[in-house]
Amino acid sequence: MISLIKKNIPLFLLNWYHFCLAFLGAVLYGFPSKKLKVIGVTGTNGKTTVVSLAANILEEAGFKVASLSSIRFKIGEKEQLNTLKMTMPGRLKLQKFLRQAVQSSCRYAVIEVTSEGIKQYRHCFIDFETAVFTNLTPEHIEAHGSFEKYKEAKAKLFQKVKEIHIINGDDPNAEYFMRFPARKKIVYSLKDKKLLPGKLHLLGDFNAYNALAAIQIGLSQGIELSVCQKAVEKTEALPGRMEKVIKEPFTVIVDYAHTPDALEKIYQVITGRKICVLGSAGGGRDKWKRPELGKIAAQNCDEIILTNEDPYDEDPEKIIEDIEKGVTFSMKPGQRCYRVLDRGEAIKKALSLAGPGDTVMITGKGSELWICVDGGKKIPWDDRKKAKEEFAKLKI
């Protein structure tokens, strides 16, 4: 009912509603961000990892920290899973979280800032000290209307923040984000090898970028490089982010990758024979990317299993058909593609195809705890748990 009402409200009234709700949240909780150093991390990919690494660095330096990501809400030592199916919570929840951080004597709050959150004014009435840009590739195009508008939404965080801007200088859009004035601008690049720790346990160049962003956050706060590197070196893995859930006799990796760029990067990290399980979200979310995901899977994997992800109100079979178009276009001799609608059965099929030294890659959901279906229903789910359950049934 609420979504139906929102669809029929003129845009200017809907924007006014979101803005007023943001103000109301700040008033109700006493503008808590004024008592914190708030660091906002935005970009298409890597936000969760940067938030986690930055929080680890600040904690290593002795500060009490609150952090908010698509994985979890953490205030000091207390943490809880993010079960909202929403990376950046609504305005009241966000302001309440910041208030709780203040009440717990936190010095810092590190939060993910999404384009949808910015579009709905969730970033308003938060005194960000630092804005961090990870990277930008096409996503949420249908929601924003174009890639340019998506980029402009991300840029609003940098327009708002006047103190510290931290920008990935290797991203093609870096120059655009450099336009906005700030007291201090920091640009990081993989060319700057001296900042990376000797033992980065997180796989892939994309995680090297995430580590660099987090290290620059620490350095911007006056933390010694050695402390930053020590904290990063301690980080073994994040839930649902290139997480190895099975290591022998073959490897099973669960990852949140759900954009073409992210999917391609995680596939390229792994060498040897690859078996992939993937789907794509429904609900009208970025339909353009479905054949692209299929194309990338066909270009990088030996066995492909297409399955259900979060169909919302769409026909899951139709979503799989859209992905399959890209697979069919790019398939090579010897490759096989299977359509297994039930996600559990798809994971079971992938494991049955794996042999010693192979890698099974299950993408799209990461550590999410639900499959979202028609009527707003959520079915309890965990890719990692399911993979372990099916593996235990194999006679190896």
Image (cartoon, rainbow, N blue to C red):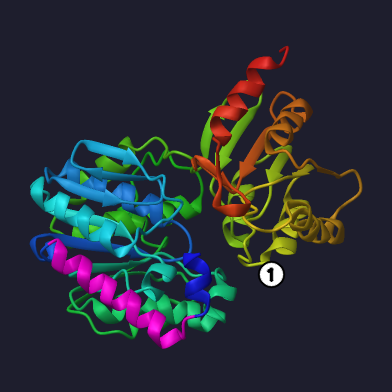
Does 120 sit above or below residue 69?
below
Q: Residue at x 35, y 54 (%)?
A: 50
Q: Which residue is mark 1?
A: 288
Say which residue appears at 12% left-offset and 49% top-offset: 106
Q: In this rendering, would 257 be left or right of 92?
A: right
Residue 104 is a magenta residue? no
Q: Residues within 10 Å of mark 1 (few under 14, many from 20)?
A: some
Residue lying farthest to the front in this orientation: 1
> Residue 383 location in percent, x, y?
58, 35
Measured from the top left, where is residue 339 in percent x and y? 81, 44
Instruction: Give how far across and how far down residue 346 sits, in percent.
Output: 73, 36
Name the amino acid, label 1.
Trp
Q: Residue at 51% of width from left, 83% of height from top?
A: 148
Instruction: State the predominant SS element of the stretch in magenta.
Output: helix
- Which residue is depicted at the point 46% across and 86% down? 10
* Residue 76 position within the rendered picture, expressed as x and y whole percent measured from the top left: 18, 41
Q: Which picture quadrant has residue 273?
A: top right
Magenta region includes residue 24: yes
Q: What residue span does the magenta drawing correspond to? A: 9-29
Height in image: 86 above or below 385?
below
Is residue 111 visible in the rendered image? The answer is: yes
Query: Can you say whether 14 is above or below 171 in the image?
Result: below
